[in-house]
């Protein structure tokens, strides 16, 4: 985030809208820096971008005081400052941070999975971010271990994969004896990895880019590193002494049966055309429309409370990084900004926002940004926003019924 602040000479003297913004943003940002002079700007922009995407991604803050905004410099000097900043960024080591050797941990993790009676792979958004889809799919396919995606981990392994335990979540986490958690934090979304949702004897193998996360959770085996790299190492280790749970294995069979059962129950609800709309009927219509798009799959932005929860269960993600939702903290207002960002990042994909009316209201003005941007550099025909206004649909249906009757 780039923002302005008061003139540096007047700071501390009660200037208009004076605030120590660096102090205010520091607790929430990975990096909070101020450009004290115009010449600092290129270096700080690159520094903030690098910090944003390094390790666990997160927001950075760059403060440009008003006196700096009014400074000028020669175009040639600006060009050389930018060139220097680009060169410095280019020479930075792009490889993931080196951590202490993973060798021992990888052997222990493979052994734990091999000996487990009821193993589970939990796929988090960190795995999606690390582009670990090939490695994780290979792990699941070669070992036959069921997997459970977190909301934004959906699609790393296709939702339609027969070993998906999304529809048998309670059984999977409640009864697994070893859980490999790749790129997901054991926070409230995963019930802190504790009973009663998890068995008290479950052994966790935790893969995370942040050493702090491993120290906090104290898993049986902690593997600090990028999910793609770690799972690739694990695949290599397993290859030397392969194992695979058959579909008839009691654990796999129990998960598959439970999933089928629950999917059937949900489908029975989904096929009904409930009017006035409940959450299921419009969600089914949206699901089918999205699936009809095929590949490249649309990016689904999901926001709201019930809308997001029901959408997580009903909407199908078969490609990685195709679901963005209000995230770990359930922050309303991110949805339409995400749409704009997703359309910029992936112009060849449709972007479909499935929003509760309140969530939509938090950032409805972004639609204007979206429309203005479409006219200039987005391909409008290929990039749509389908927004679900539950209350509006309800109203329209009442109207429809009034007309029909
Ligand atoms: C920034 C922010 N403010 C307030 C909330 C509290 N909150 C949680 S869900 C929600 C509204 C959800 O309503 P809606 O988007 O209509 O979704 P629905 O439940 O109808 O599907 C609010 C305000 C929040 N999560 N984030």
Image: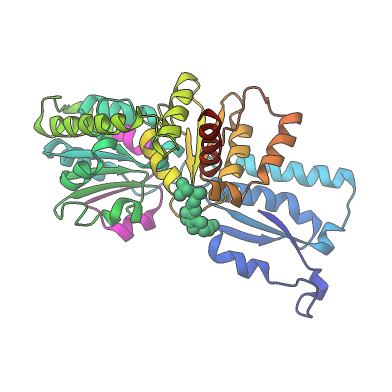
What percent of the width, then of the height, locates residue 396?
56, 36
What percent of the width, then of the height, locates residue 259?
22, 32
Q: In the rendered view, would you say 189 is above or below 379? A: below
Magenta span has 14? no
* Residue lying at 82% horizontally and 42% vertically, measured from the top left: 79
Q: In the rendered view, would you say 264 is above or below 123? A: above
* Residue lying at 60% horizontally and 42% vertically, measured from the top left: 336
Q: Is residue 306 left or right of residue 7?
A: left
* Residue lying at 48% horizontally and 32% vertically, measured from the top left: 322
Task: Write down the quadrant of residue 372 in the picture.
Answer: top right
Q: How many numbered badges does the structure rendering display?
A: 0
Q: Residue furthest bottom?
A: 13
Q: Does residue 381 appear in this view? A: yes
Q: Is residue 132 left or right of residue 44?
A: left
Q: In this view of the protein, which residue sits in the foreground, 392 or 382?
A: 392
Q: In this view of the protein, which residue sits in the foreground, 26 or 356?
A: 356
Q: Is residue 315 left or right of residue 39?
A: left
Q: In the rendered view, would you say 13 is above or below 217? A: below
Task: Write down the quadrant of residue 350 in the picture.
Answer: top right
Q: Does residue 187 appear in this view? A: no
Stretch in magenta: 209-233
What percent of the width, then of the height, locates residue 313?
35, 37
What percent of the width, then of the height, locates residue 264?
25, 29
């Amino acid at each position: 985030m780039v923002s302005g602040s008061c003139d540096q000479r007047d700071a501390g003297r009660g200037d208009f809208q004076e605030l120590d913004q660096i102090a205010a943003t520091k607790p929430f940002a990975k990096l909070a820096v101020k450009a004290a002079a115009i010449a600092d700007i290129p270096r700080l922009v690159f520094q903030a971008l690098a910090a944003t995407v390094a390790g666990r991604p997160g927001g950075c803050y760059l403060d440009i005081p008003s006196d700096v905004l009014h400074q000028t410099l020669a175009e040639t000097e600006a060009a050389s400052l930018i060139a220097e900043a680009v060169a410095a960024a280019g020479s930075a080591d792009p490889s993931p941070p080196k951590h202490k050797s993973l060798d021992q941990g990888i052997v222990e993790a493979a052994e734990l999975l091999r000996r487990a009676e009821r193993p589970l792979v939990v796929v988090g958004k960190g795995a999606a971010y690390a582009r670990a889809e090939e490695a994780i799919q290979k792990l699941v396919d070669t070992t036959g271990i069921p997997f459970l995606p977190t909301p934004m981990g959906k699609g790393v392994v296709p939702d339609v994969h027969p070993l998906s335990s999304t529809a048998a979540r309670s059984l999977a986490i409640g009864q697994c004896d070893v859980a490999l958690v790749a790129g997901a934090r054991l926070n409230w979304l995963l019930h802190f990895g504790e009973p009663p949702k998890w068995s008290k004897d479950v052994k966790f193998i935790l893969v995370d880019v942040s050493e702090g996360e491993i120290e906090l959770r104290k898993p049986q085996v902690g593997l600090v590193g990028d999910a793609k790299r770690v799972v690739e190492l694990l695949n290599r280790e397993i290859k030397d002494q392969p194992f695979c749970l058959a579909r008839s294995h009691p654990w796999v069979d129990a998960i598959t049966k439970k999933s089928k059962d629950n999917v059937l129950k949900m489908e029975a609800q989904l096929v009904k055309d409930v009017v006035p709309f409940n959450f299921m009927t419009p969600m089914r219509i949206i699901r089918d429309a999205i699936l009809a798009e095929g590949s490249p799959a649309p990016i689904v932005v999901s926001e709201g409370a019930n809308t997001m929860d029901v959408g997580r269960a009903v909407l199908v993600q078969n490609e990685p990084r195709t679901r963005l939702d209000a995230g770990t903290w359930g922050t309303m207002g991110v949805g339409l900004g995400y749409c704009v960002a997703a359309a910029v990042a992936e112009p060849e994909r449709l972007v479909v926002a499935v929003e509760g009316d309140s969530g939509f209201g938090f950032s409805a003005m972004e639609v204007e940004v979206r429309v203005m941007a479409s006219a200039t550099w987005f391909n409008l025909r290929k990039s749509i926003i389908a927004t679900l206004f539950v209350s509006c649909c309800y109203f329209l249906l009442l109207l429809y019924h009034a007309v029909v009757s």
